[in-house]
Image (cartoon, grey):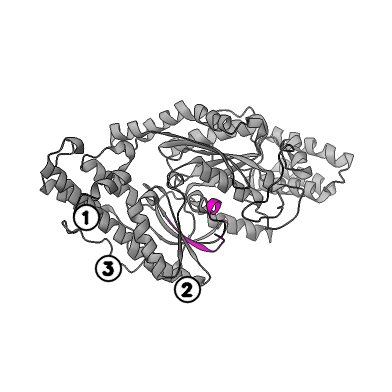
Amino acid sequence: FSYWAEFRLTLMRSECHLYREAFTGALIHLWLASKSSLSIKMVSLVPTLSSTISRLNLFPKPSFHYTLRALTTLQLQHKKRSPIRSPLNSSFNRMSANLSFSNFNYPKPRNENPAIMDDDLVVLGIETSCDDTAAAVVRSNGEILSQVVSSQADLLARYGGVAPKMAEEAHSQVIDQVVQEALDKANLTETDLSAVAVTIGPGLSLCLRVGVQKARKIAGSCNLPIVGVHHMEAHALVARLFERELQFPFMALLISGGHNLLILARDLGQYIQLGTTIDDAIGEAYDKTAKWLGLDLRRSGGPAIEELAREGDAESVKFSVPMKQHKDCNFSYAGLKTQVRLAIESKNINAEIPISSASSQDRSSRADIAASFQRVAVLHLEERCERAIGWALKIDPSIKYLVVSGGVASNQYVRSRLNQVVMKNDLQLVCPPPSLCTDNGVMVAWTGIEHFRVGRFDPPPPANEPEDTVLDLRPRWPLGEEYAEGRSEARSLRRARIHPSLTSLIQASLQQQS
């Protein structure tokens, strides 16, 4: 208590945010140290500390009810459910919390033993990073209780791509309905949940805000912990929900409309970036090519291109493979997009005429371009993956799997070509089901469960949190630290205003603890 008196005096004299975090850690560890033998003095101490901090307006007032509940048990209103062992074979894990929205501070080591039955967790996942509004409820034993996705396909077709402001408005119109439908399909209410997980980045800021505000509203009103999720990590980790033998370390190729990423996943939250896109991602190239060819964008560009390409000759148009001169694992699709646009112009293809109304000769020309584009686009993936596998095996020879996920991973041509690459290197290809390759709430909920198990979560936000609260959104958020030997001479044009990577945040917090 003498330490508390001294600390309280220091806190009253300072507005530095570091004291907030120090106090948070001290408060949590005070409760952890006390365990079950809580004295009356310690019980009365929490409201006293909380009210003092609240008066200083440093951060929202902690909930005594939540803190006590987290220390005694975290079965969180699921006594009626029988515990089932997780497919990841995770034992009980210590829980801690921090009071900033940086969800990955103060991580705890694995395989410790608090009074937490993590196999009985039920988590709601919310995803609004781009153009899909998604929610799902997942149990920590791997059971998917519900999954709901509201697509903005009509908007995509109308605007020829994602219009951030329109996408935000569409999210706002359906988010309540999507979340409620996910709960209804799971036969649960908000109070039955153990936690809420939500994507906080990377993505479009306007869209991310809608999901985060909804998640915080639920967590605040029902006194639930909240887990901020990295969108690309969720794409990688959802494979562990279905492949029980997929343990760290493994490689992952994450391919979508906004990202191309090759990573070595050494552990949860510990990633090495082997390669990334320096301009446009493969999904962006697919979408633009589909638009220029007059295809139906309500299905997204990937499936439309894949279907039309079956009718064409993949060798008929000679597109060059990007970045042949750069011996690294980075990606570039901007140049290939330009080649495709020029080829379309040379064939006098009018994108205003939909493929369904094109003449047979016009359709044949479009099919040849689609097939040639797809061959070169995927060949670029193959070459980069081949080199990345060599780098990854040099770092960790125990790697057995390559996970391929993200929206483009639902393309069967992509899967078949990459499967040949991994077979040559005695690895195994792991792809989530196509419905979980595109953006979805299941991957967010599952990633939330994985981090929740090791204590990376936030306590409930205030129940009456103002709508104009400044949120920690991370629209440009790298997943891992760049592999030193793989740095490319090619310069990315997207370096400004990038948030520190998830891996660096976790490493920094681990160093703080040691």
- The residue where tag 2 is placed is 394
**SS of the residue at dot 3?**
loop
Residue 298 placement (x, y as % from top left) = 32, 36
Measured Cα–Cα span from mark 3 to mark 2: 22 Å
- For this rendering, which residue is in front, 20 or 319? 319
- Write the residue at 18% across / 55% down: 313
Point out the stretch of residues depicted in magenta.
240-253
- The residue where tag 1 is placed is 372
**SS of the residue at dot 2?**
helix
Q: Quadrant of residue 38?
A: top right
- Write the residue at 33% across / 39% down: 299
- The amino acid beneath tag 3 is Gln
Front label number (2 vs 1)? 1
- The amino acid beneath tag 2 is Lys
- For this rendering, which residue is in front, 59 or 94? 94
Q: Quadrant of residue 378?
A: bottom left
Residue 231 placement (x, y as % from top left) = 48, 47
